[in-house]
């Protein structure tokens, strides 16, 4: 069976960032014991990621790159914003367990859209936040193996495509999966 629409797919992979001629950095690694599971064609994965897997079958190996413009876009300086420190206060106090440099903070824009920002710096009056995706501007290099391809059940399709958690999640604890919901 080959990877196509509505197939349940399991892969193990290593994700490197950076150009091949430079020394790429290992960003993420899954294993046969803890693989990535998704339903092909449901919008859970990057379009170019799926495009590179389409037609493969269990046992096939893969090795491909995705350029920034086909992944998470270019890094944009205008996505770094200074916000008034008071918006991070709860009952007049800053939560130092949440607000520290390097931490990713879930936020909401004026239109009610959920987004995550990384705390760049904190001053007396402002918090500088970076709203670029952590992999913006990066070339993604995936190497791995297709472990399983099978028809997805109706229950799996429903679980993977229902709202919340980035369109679904294959793990019991969503914070532990690679579905893009954390």
Image (tube, grey):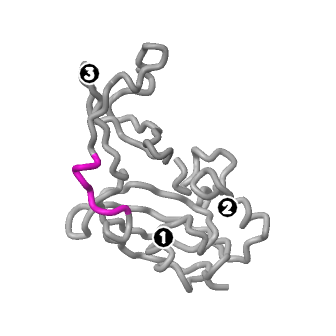
Q: Which residue is disc 1 drawn over?
A: 144
Q: Which residue is disc 3 drawn over?
A: 125
Q: CA distance from mark 3 to mark 2?
A: 42 Å
Q: Residues within 10 Å of mark 2 (few under 14, many from 20)?
A: many
- Above or below: residue 25 compared with residue 55: above
Q: CA distance from mark 1 to mark 3?
A: 47 Å
- Above or below: residue 3 compared with residue 77: below
Number of marks? 3
Q: Position of residue 122 (x, y in %)?
A: 27, 26
Residue 75 painted magenta? yes
Q: Which residue is disc 2 drawn over?
A: 160
- Above or below: residue 152 compared with residue 81: below
Q: Which mark is residue 21?
A: none
Q: Which residues are magenta?
A: 72-79
Q: Is 167 in front, or is 171? A: 167
Quadrant placement of the N terminus: bottom right
Residue 110 painted magenta? no
Q: Are marks 3 and 2 in contact (CB under 8 Å)?
A: no
Q: Earlier in the sequence, mark 3 or mark 2?
A: 3
- Above or below: residue 161 compared with residue 8: above
Q: Are marks 1 and 3 in contact (CB under 8 Å)?
A: no
Q: Is residue 45 left or right of residue 117?
A: right
Which residue is drawn at the image coordinates 37% and 52% (left, top)? 133
């Amino acid at each position: 069976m080959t990877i196509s629409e509505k197939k349940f797919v399991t892969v193990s992979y290593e994700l490197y960032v950076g150009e091949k001629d430079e020394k790429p950095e290992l960003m993420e690694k899954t294993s046969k014991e803890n693989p990535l599971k998704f339903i092909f064609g449901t919008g859970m994965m990057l379009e170019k990621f799926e495009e590179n897997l389409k037609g493969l079958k269990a046992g096939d190996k893969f090795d491909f790159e995705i350029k920034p413009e086909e992944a998470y876009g270019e890094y944009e300086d205008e996505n770094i914003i200074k916000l008034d420190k008071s918006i991070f206060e709860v009952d007049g106090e800053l939560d130092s367990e949440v607000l520290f440099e390097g931490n990713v903070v879930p936020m909401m824009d004026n239109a009610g859209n959920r987004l995550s920002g990384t705390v760049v710096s904190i001053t007396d009056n402002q918090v500088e936040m970076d709203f670029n995706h952590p992999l913006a501007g990066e070339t993604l290099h995936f190497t791995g193996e297709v472990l399983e391809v099978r028809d997805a059940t109706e229950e799996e399709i429903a679980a993977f495509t229902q709202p919340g958690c980035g369109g679904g999640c294959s793990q019991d604890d969503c914070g532990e999966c690679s579905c893009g919901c954390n």
